[in-house]
Amino acid sequence: MATNFAHLLKRPALQAKKPEALPAGTYPAIITKYEFGDNNKNKTPYVRFMVKLTGWANDVPADEQDSSIDLSKRTMRRDFYLTDDSLHRLDDFIRSCGIVGEGKDYEEVLPELMGKDVEVEVQQYMSEKTGDIGNQIGAIKGA
């Protein structure tokens, strides 16, 4: 059965509010999904991990923690390139999550990351096009 999105499309157009950027810090999160792609400008293949934040960063002062922000609805991503020069970063991440990968292929190991608790370094950046402040993940490691 197909999912019906009609109720979502009945909302007023061009009135969506952009979420506020989160303060920079190291947030607890959980890995919810991974996917592969190569849609960057150089067509370099990557694996993308989607993470859902599960709480505020301990290193963000209480007065910067906006209680109106529902962190459980904040999904972020972290890409790892699948090239000979970059795979060591993915290996480090897998090890930090407590996964033993020796003797296994990546296609066997990657599903083991689903549901793992991680710590993500949420960074702020300024969009060159709009000047808006946004967030991106810097480092990611097992919790």
Image (cartoon, helix red, strand yellow):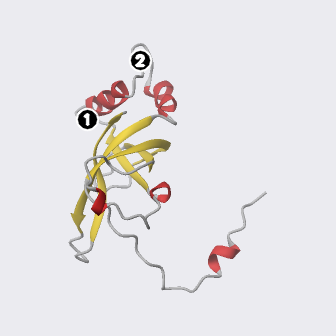
Query: Which disc, if any, is residue 100?
Result: 2
Q: How many marks on residues? A: 2
Amino acid marked by disc 2: Val
Residue with the mark numbered 1: 86
In terms of depth relative to the viewer, which is nearer, 65 or 71? 65
* Image location (x, y in percent) of residue 129: 24, 75
Whether tag 2 and tag 1 are in contact, CB under 8 A, the answer is no
Quadrant location of residue 61?
Answer: bottom left
Amino acid marked by disc 1: Ser
Name the residue at 74% across, 60% down: 2
* Image location (x, y in percent) of residue 74: 44, 58
Relative side of 137 to 2, left or right: left
* Image location (x, y in percent) of residue 54: 45, 48
Query: Which disc, if any, is residue 49?
Result: none
Quadrant location of residue 47?
Answer: top left
Of all residues shown, which one is farthest toward the front?
63
With respect to residue 125, does 33 lie above or below? above
Crowd class of label 2 (few under 14; some 14 to 19; many from 20; radius 10 Å): few
Kind of element beneath mark 2: loop
Q: Earlier in the sequence, mark 2 or mark 1?
A: 1
In terms of depth relative to the viewer, which is nearer, 22 or 31? 22
* Image location (x, y in percent) of residue 31: 46, 41
Relative side of 87 to 16, left or right: left
Name the residue at 48% across, 85% down: 15
Q: CA distance from mark 2 to mark 1?
A: 19 Å
Q: Assign the C terminus to one quadrant of the image.
A: top left
Q: Assign the N terminus to one quadrant of the image.
A: bottom right
